[in-house]
Structures are given as structure tokens and as C-alpha cells.
Amino acid sequence: MGLYLYGGKVLMTDDIREKIPYYLGRGGKMEQLPGFIFRQEQANMAEEVGNTLIGEMFLAAEVGTGVGKTFGYLIPAILFAVEEGKKVVVSTRTRALQEQIMQHDIPDLKKVMEVNFTAAEARGRENYLCWNKYINIISGRKNIEDNQVDFITAILTWAEKTRTGDRKELSLNSELMKEWGMVAADRNSCLRDKCKYHDRCFRLKMIRSLEKADIIIVNHALLLSDLLTEHSVLPEYEHLIIDEAHSFNRESFERLSTRFSRQENIIIYNLLYDVNHTGRGFLNYLKGRFPHLAPLLMETTDLIKRGVELNKELFDIIGAGSDDFNYTRIVKGNFGDRQWMEEAYPVYLDWQANQNLIKMKLEDLIPELDEDDGQELSSLIAVLTGCGDNGYKVMEEELEADHCLVWIEYDRGRAAAICSSKINAGDTIDSRLYQKLKALVMVSATLAIADRFDHFIDQNGLKSYARQERLYCLLEKSPFNYDKQSCLYLVDDMPDITHPKFEPAVGQVLFDVINAVGGNILVLFTARKQLRQVSEMLRPVCKEQNIRLLVQYEDGDFGTLIDEFTAASNTVLMGLETFWEGVDLKGDLLRCLVIVKLPFRAPSDPYCSAWEKYCVTQKKNSFTEFMLPDAAVRFKQGVGRLIRSEEDRGAVVVLDNRLTGKRYGQVFLSSIPIKNIVHIKRRDIGILGDWI
Ligand code: SF4
């Protein structure tokens, strides 16, 4: 088995090189699958993925909608894994995509491919039944509330029979499933090696299945948390494919952040000793079982009461004077922040000292208890310690560090948490992940801006690999005929987006769009307040016209809204961020897409602020280096919702006049595949009906 060199690039072994066209070439084996269409772009992509894995390179690949990127990376990955005896990990953005691969794509490939391979799915521990928790409940060792009895009764038969312990096997209603947490495995309560049910543990079974697999399918969240927990889930791997890679940097930022939370502190206090319901909590249970420990237990509960008071005092100071902030506020370290920091710090130190005292008292109790109670108390101590560690990291290590960003999350006017993260997630991912890999493929339909990958490479900490010529890029365009299938209308005479007349104008234009198109309209917003305002304007009009208006946060969750949207043709769906990416509606289900504003991130978004701070430290312009390219990629994602198959036809309407009025508008327009662009006035919206 030899390697072939061509123009300095390492090419595939004979076996893999021959097999890719055998499966993905014109007339190839994949055509045995119903609905499969040969795409040269897909075969090209598969060849490059194969080259990357064999040649130990890094690849950033933008592969347009309709190319079939999943088979484009799975087939070379399977061939490589089987022939070379190496594991390939495939990471997707969401659990839904992970399930799509496991339940549809892998079974399809098993039907067609002439190699034996095993694929396993890595899932978060919260999906698995924990025997220890379950048996504690059914043996009566742990008391449960009346409303939890129904849930336990409903899962009894399943729990005794299941081979996987995976919650996805259950088909209970959402009300009952709210109680799943009481039997779910979780990091804090897991007894690990000391667990009596270690050999039967479902989560550990899943982890063992990963050891034997050629291909492991994981999601980004689990991949990232595995990095943070020193690979507690995934076995060693050196070959990684990251799908939907456009969002990987943001997810890395979020996953690598630390959250010091008011509520999480309260939860652990309540588990130990519920100050409001004095009959509850583990220490109360111990008081009944071990009367001779009463004095020590009393001292400990007094410390917990003090912890509750200090926790309240601390978070009240952190959130003081900011009732207006409902979501997030960035800590800038300026005068206003200095004031609360100075006031909060001594309280924080008292809280931390009190935590240590609680911990010491709890540790003193352990030798006095039997094995089971001792184990349970140990796991509670671990949770308490975790809260203290989070406080230390945010308040002592990162609060004033130049390389970190700190922000406060508010819930109904109160500080709910103070969080921190490194400002450049790419550097952290480089040291924790990329440097340990032999081959990396990052693929998405939206990586490039005007066909260039500079922003993606920079943002994801891949610059040094590009300099070493270890990273190369691939651009495979969509096979769809966008000129025939789509048209983008720019409404030139909209008021400025900051003008008070903008929202009423949006309402009027949407009304005209509805009149012209009828339904199957998706409207993408960037701000919740604006979504609410426009929804209030449109709702009565839609009712009058018998148009079904579906609004995020008002008419159901994502899945419900999509189901209702696809169930009838006279529907208009209005949504925020999740709808810019997660919608895949083919044919007539979506005929018109309206983009209200260009998707620049709000400065209060910690991810955006972190990049701004990073650009300042690097003496770079944050608008050109981050805000603009980031918004262009998100715009491209949004526009990409419209044409999902060769049969689709539709229009995009953009209501933000910055697209034509600002020079940077060209960056947005040059990034999307639609080149059929028409400038119209508001009064001409009716012509949309002619196009569609
Ligand atoms: S090892 Fe942990 S998750 Fe598994 S059964 Fe035991 S306590 Fe539960």
C-alpha cells in the first residue's frame, strides 16, 4: 500500500482512490440507493477528504447546498478507518444531525458498502439511566415527591428490559419526561469506580462501544466537553471531521466558558439542607439515621444557612442597579463595574471561606457513615467543590485578566450568573485539540466569504497550519441553478434601521409580501423586541386574511412551529437565530424568505464582545476582522434556507437598506450564490407574485 505524491500533495492509497469513484462516481454503487443523484462535486469532495486523512493534512471545505456532503465525508472516512485500522470521529452541530447520520445515513451505507464497519454514537451522560439513582428510588432509600411517582411507574418495565438505558427509547409525554433528571446519570452524583453497578452502567457500556467502533458520531457540545474532562468519553483519536464547522468557534467559546451561578449554589445547598423546607435535604436524613451526629450536623446546617445568605448578598451586589438588563451585560472594568467589584469582593471571599468550612464539616461526617451514605455525601461534596471552583475561576482568575471576558447573565432583573471565557477560543482549541490531531476536516456549506477562507482560518486558530502548508481549502459550489431558481429583491426605500418608522414599514412590507405570495413565507429577525413589535402589528391583519401567523416564543417551540408551518400553505413563520440555520424545507414548503436586518451580532453578545476585545489586544479593526465577516457568513446561512433542492423556486426579500447604502453591502452580496438581484421600491412588492 503506497502513498502517491503529486505536486507536493500526498494522495490516497490505491485502494481508497479506486473505491471512491466505485461508490460515488457516475453509475457508482451509491446509485442503488433510492433518490441518490450522482454529483461530481461530491466525488471531488470525497477524494479530498480521503487525501486529507491519508496524507495527515488539515482541510477546510465549503461544500454548497445539495452536493451531499455527509456521504462525501462518510465514505472516505469509512474506507480509511477500515483499511488503516484507525478511528475517525465525526462531529455534527446538533443531536438531530447526529441521529440523522446514525439512523439514516449509516444504515444506507451498510446496505451499499462492501466493507464491514462499525459505527457508534457518543451521547451525553444525561441521556442514560443511572442504576444507582434508579435503585435508590425503587428500594425506597430515596424519597420522591407524589408527582414523580407517575414517572417512575411509567419507566419501570422499560428500565428492567432496556439494553441501552438510553432515554430516546422512551416515548413518554413531555410532562412525564420533565422528571427524567431524577434517574439520569450526571457528573456530580456519579460514584465512578466506587459504584456498585459499575459493570452494568449504561453510560460506561456506551463508552466501551466507542472503543470498538471504526467511526464515532458525536456532537460538537460533547466533543468539546470531552476535551475539558480529559477525554472521559471518547477514546483516543487522531482523525477528526467537523461538520457544520461554521459554528464551531462560537460553540467552543460557549463550552469553554465558566459559569458561577446563583441558582447552582442554591441547588447544592438545598440538596444538603433545604433552609425553606427544613424537613428536606441529605443532612436532615442523616439526623434521623445517626442521632449521635446531631451536634456536628447542626454546625454544618448553620454554615449552610450562612452560605445561602452570602450567596444572595453576593449576587444582589453583582446585579445591583441593572434592572433594565434582562439578558446579558458585559463587565467592562470601568467605573460602574469597579464600584460593584469593590463591594462584591469581600462578600465573595466570605462566601468562599464559608464554602471551605462547609466542606470540612461534611468531610468530618464521612467516617461516621455507612458505605452508601458516605458515597452519597462524597458526591454532594464534589458538587459543592465544583461551585467553589467556578467562583474562584471567575472572581479570582479571570475577572480582571486581559485575555478573558466576563459577563453577567440576568434573569428577570436579577443577576443569575457571572461568567467568564478566554477571548480567543481558537487558540484554546488549537492547544487542546488541533495539536493532537493527525488529520482534520472542517466542512460546511458556509465557510468562505467571497470565495476566500481567511476569516474562517483566522477565527478558528488555523493560521499556523495554513502557513506551514498543512491546511488547504476546497470550494465545491452548489449544483443548483440559482439564476433560474431564485431572485433576491432589495427594497431600496426602507427607512433606516434605527429610525422609529422602520418597524411600521417592516409590518407594511410584510403585509404586502403576504398579499403577493399568499403563504409559505419565512421571516428572519435578529432581535426579539423587533420580532414582538412586528408580530403585534401583523397578528390582527393575518387573522382577518385567514393567514396563519407563527411566531417564535409566542406559538410554540422550534419543532412545533416547523410542523405547523409545513402542515398548511397559508402560513407565515417569524423567527430568530435558530431559524437562520436550522430550517430545511424543500419544494413549495418555502417560497419566500424575508430578511429584516443584516445579522450583525449585538455588542452585548459575549461572543461578539470577546472578539472585539481580542481585536483591540491585537490592534486590529474589530468591524472588518470580526463583525462584518461573521455577519456575512450568517447572512449566507439565512439565504441558504431558500433553495434546498433542484425543484425549489423562490424569492429572498431584504429590508435592510445598508445592503445597498453601505460599501460593505457588497461583502454580503458577493458571499451568496444568488446573483439574480433586483432593486425595488416598497410600492412594487406585488411583483414578487410574478416571480414565484
Ligand atoms: S457508574 Fe455512575 S452513572 Fe453509572 S450507574 Fe454508577 S453512579 Fe450511575
Image (cartoon, helix red, strand yellow):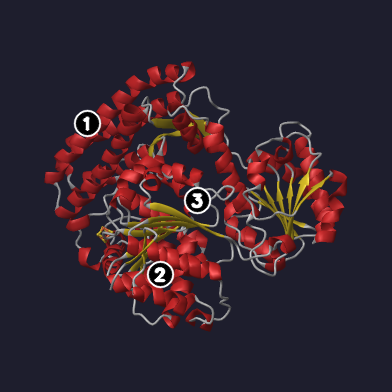
Q: CA distance from mark 3 to mark 1?
A: 46 Å
Residue carrying label 3: 246
Q: Position of residue 676 (x, y in %)?
A: 74, 55
Q: CA distance from mark 2 to mark 1?
A: 56 Å
- Callout 1 amino acid: Leu
Q: Is residue 211 visible?
A: yes
Residue carrying label 1: 357
- Callout 2 amino acid: Pro
Which of the marked residues, 2 or 1, is nearer the chain's N terminus? 2
Mark 1, other Cα within 10 Å: few <14 / some 14–19 / many ≥20:
some
Q: Is residue 128 visible?
A: no
Above-or-below relation of 574 to 13 = above
User: Is residue 536 toward the left or the right of residue 461 in the image?
Assistant: right
Q: Position of residue 274 (x, y in %)?
A: 34, 40
Mark 2, other Cα within 10 Å: few <14 / some 14–19 / many ≥20:
many
Residue carrying label 2: 76
